[in-house]
Each structure stands twice: as structure tokens, then as C-alpha cells.
Amino acid sequence: MKKKYVISIIIIVILLISLLFCLFYPPKFTLNKGNITLKYGTKFQDPGVTITKFGHNYTEKVKINNKINPKKLGTYDIIYQIKIFGITFEKTRKVTIVDKEKPEITLNGSQNITICPNAEYKEEGYKATDNYDGDITNKVKLNTQNNIITYSVQDSSNNKTTITRTITKEDKINPTITLKGSQNQTIYTNSTWQEPGYTVSDNCDNNLNSNVIVNGKVNTKKAGTYKITYTVKDLSGNTFSVIRTIKVINKPVVNNSNNPKPSKKGVIYLTFDDGPNEGTTNVILDILKQNNVKATFFVTGKGPDSLIQREYQEGHAIALHTFTHNYETVYKSVDNYYNDLAQIQNRVKKLTGTETKIIRFPGGSSNTVSKKYSKGIMSVLTKDVVSKGYHYFDWNVDSDDAGGARNSTTVYNNVIKGLSKNRSNIVLMHDVKPQTRDALNNIIKYGKNNGYTFEKITMQTPMVTHKVNN
Ligand code: ZN
């Protein structure tokens, strides 16, 4: 009886031990993918876990404790926890966040820079940024060898980036010579030719002026066209040349074979500038017609074509003034002057079918306004136009209708006061002015009543010219 009791106790103890063993026996955790290395910046996605014990699946009951800080590199624990019959079991997964991305260096300016041979390269700057460390510009190291600059930088995870910049010392750009004075000049025989000078500019080299080689001579004893060549080479061997042309001409003589007729005394040449103009020119033409007087119109690019055609058809002289009447453009250079003259010549030729060599400079040959745009240009032009066969006319009677004469009485008085029987009278007026239009009939009446005759300017009319002031 006692023995039986002992056996029962032994069995109960064995059962109890078995039960405890079963309760504390750990479940099996299967971590998909095990420990994980995660690239910084990518999101952690749990690959999952499977938990089984004695054929039972406990996966559903898992509690996950995620301690990852995605903003910081390091190794983190993910703890999977399960409670079976009040007993807690757990398994840890290690997740390591790493930075494998290289920093980036960006250069200010080009990767290939060309500078002058005698220049020093001045660092144009750079910037280094890293996906994890941010701005690491101050960690960039520079190393220069044989005109190659190496920029390298390392981030806190030892990822390294290296880039280079190449500096080429070279000059392939020509110097330039700027001539002082006009590139095309006209002078009279037996005058003195004086070199107006020049300046050299170059992208790399200074003070090349003394390196200029000047070739060519001007023989002022002999009329002809002379060329002077200016050549300069910079320190890298780039060359530049420019040619100046000097025309030496014989001084034209007014009233010679070109102007066979001597100045006619007591003749009035009415001249009208700046037109044509609707509302004034047409009335002026009516008055001239009624009085059977011929005049000279120095026309411009303005006004209706029909009025220039009428002037021509009614027997007046069409002469050239200027197309634009813009002093700044016309007197900027000799070439500009001739371009403007060609434009008004074209207009006249288109409208009348003929060309004319009779001209009047905008502002007259004595103008000083041209000084602002080109010094000495009137001295050149007054000779040059004559050498090209033009006759230019200023005036010796000024109506002042473009100045202070604002009404017809003043215009009339100015003209009457200026007339002289002892010479030919070239009267400056502007057919664009209403006060001139209104004074004209009385001026003509005065002339006729006082023994003057009226003529238009022709190539035989002696030139009346002012003293040149520029
Ligand atoms: Zn004018």
C-alpha cells in the first residue's frame, strides 16, 4: 500500500516536470532574410517572421518593437515578442543603416578653363554636398599638378569623390588696332601729312602700341591714293593689320573750268531745305509758279514723293540735303555721311530719274555740331565731296526761319536786309516753315521791284561756301 503511494507521487512529479518543460520550451522564430543592411534613405520594410511551437503557428500573435531611427546611421534592434500561456518569448533582428553613396562636387565655372599665358588662375570656386553629411565644402582638398586641379572629398562613411579641372594657358585671340582719325582721308597736294596715331588693344597683352609696324608713305607732292598698313603681333604671335587710305588731291578752284560763269551780280537764288512738307511746300510751289520764279530745293527723306516730283516737273532744281537729318548718325564718320547722301540720292533718282551733284551739308559746312560726333570731319568732307565732283552750297543770306524768325514779317525783313546787288545772293529758307510760306510772295515782289533776278542753282553756279569750323 505504501509502495503504490510512492509510485503515484513519482508519476505526478514526472507529469508536472513534463508540463513545466512544455510550458517553458521556446517556440521557433524564423526571421525572413535574417539580419538586414539597409541603405540610408530607403524605408525599412519588415520581411516578416514565422513562429511555431509543437506544430502550432503563433505568428499572428506577434508583437513587434521597432527601434529604427531612419535619420541616423547605426545598428538597430527589431524585437519580435510572443506570449504563450502567460510566458513571454522574444527574438531580435539587427538592422544596420549604412551610407554607401558618394558625395558630389560641383565646380563653379567650366571644367576646362583657358586663361592668358601670363595670367594666374584664380580659383572659381566649388561646392561639395553629401546625401548624409550635407554641405561638406570645407572638407574638399585641392591639389594642383601640371595645370590640372584635383578636388577630392570624403564623407563620414569614407565614401570618396574626386574630380578635376584643367587650366589651359593659351591666347588665340588677335589684338586690334584702332586708328585715330578717319580710316579714309583726303588731303590737298603740298600739305603735310601727319600720322594721326592709333591704339592697340589685346585680350592678354598690354602696351602693344610700341610693337606696331607702320608701312607705307604719303607723297603729298603728287596727287594719288596712298595706303599705310599698320600691323601688330601680340606676345602669343596673333597678328592684326589695318590699312588707312590717304587720297592726295589737287585743291579745287572755285570759278574755274568747273564753274565757267563768274558769280552773277544781283541774282537771288531762293533755296529751301528740309522738305518737302505737305501744307507748306505745295503752297510755296504755287507762289513760285504764279511769279514764274525758279528755286532750289535741298530735299530730305521726309515728306510726300509727289511734292518732289512736282518740284522737278515745274522746273526747279532738286538738290541733296540729307536723308535722315540726324546729326549724330550723319556725322559719326565719313562713311556714314556718304551712306546718308546715297539714300537721299536714291530717293531723288527714283522720283525724278536723274541724279544731282548739288548738295548742302546738314547744318551747313560751317556747322560745329559735328564736332560732338567726329572731330575734323567737316575739314575732310568739304574737300572730299568736291574731289568726288559734288558742288556744295552754303548761303550768304539767312532768313533765320529755323532760328528766331517765327513770323512772316521777321522772315521777310531778314531776307531783304541780307540782299545785295553786288553779288549773287543765296538765300537760306526752309519750305517746312509756315512763316516762310507766308513771307515768300512779298520777298519775290520786293526782289522784282528792286531789279533782282531769280535763278535756280546749277552746276555752273559759283559755289558759295562758309569757313569750316570743324
Ligand atoms: Zn537742314
Image (cartoon, rainbow, N blue to C red):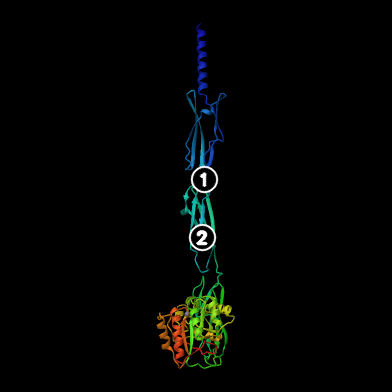
Residue 240 appears in which quarter of the rendering? bottom right
**Residue 50: mark in rendering:** none
Q: Nearer the viewer, residue 315 or 17?
A: 315
Q: In the rendered structure, which amino acid carries the disc numbered 1?
A: Asp
| Badge 2 residue CB within 8 Å of ligand 1 | no
Q: Which residue is drawn at the image coordinates 50% and 10% (left, top)?
A: 6
Picture coordinates of residue 254 (x, y %)? 52, 91
Query: Which residue in the protein does label 1 denote?
Result: 99
Is residue 40 visible in the rendered image? The answer is no
Q: Nearer the viewer, residue 156 or 446?
A: 446
Q: Tell me how far mark 2 sits from mark 1, CA to CA.
A: 30 Å
Q: Nearer the viewer, residue 464 or 268?
A: 268
User: What SS does tag 2 mark?
Assistant: loop
Residue 312 appears in which quarter of the rendering? bottom right
Q: Nearer the viewer, residue 71 or 344?
A: 344
Answer whether labels 2 and 1 touch (C-beta < 8 Å): no
Query: Which residue in the protein does label 2 denote?
Result: 109
Q: In the rendered structure, which amino acid carries the disc numbered 2?
A: Gly
**Is 300 located above or below residue 386 in the figure?**
above
Q: Which residue is drawn at the image coordinates 40% and 83% (left, top)?
A: 409
**Is 213 located above or below residue 117 in the figure?**
below
Picture coordinates of residue 424 (x, y %)? 48, 91
Picture coordinates of residue 167 (x, y %)? 54, 63
Q: How many marks?
A: 2
Picture coordinates of residue 25 (x, y %)? 52, 24
Q: Earlier in the sequence, mark 2 or mark 1?
A: 1
Tag in front: 2 or 1:
2
Q: Which residue is drawn at the image coordinates 51% and 18% (left, top)?
A: 17
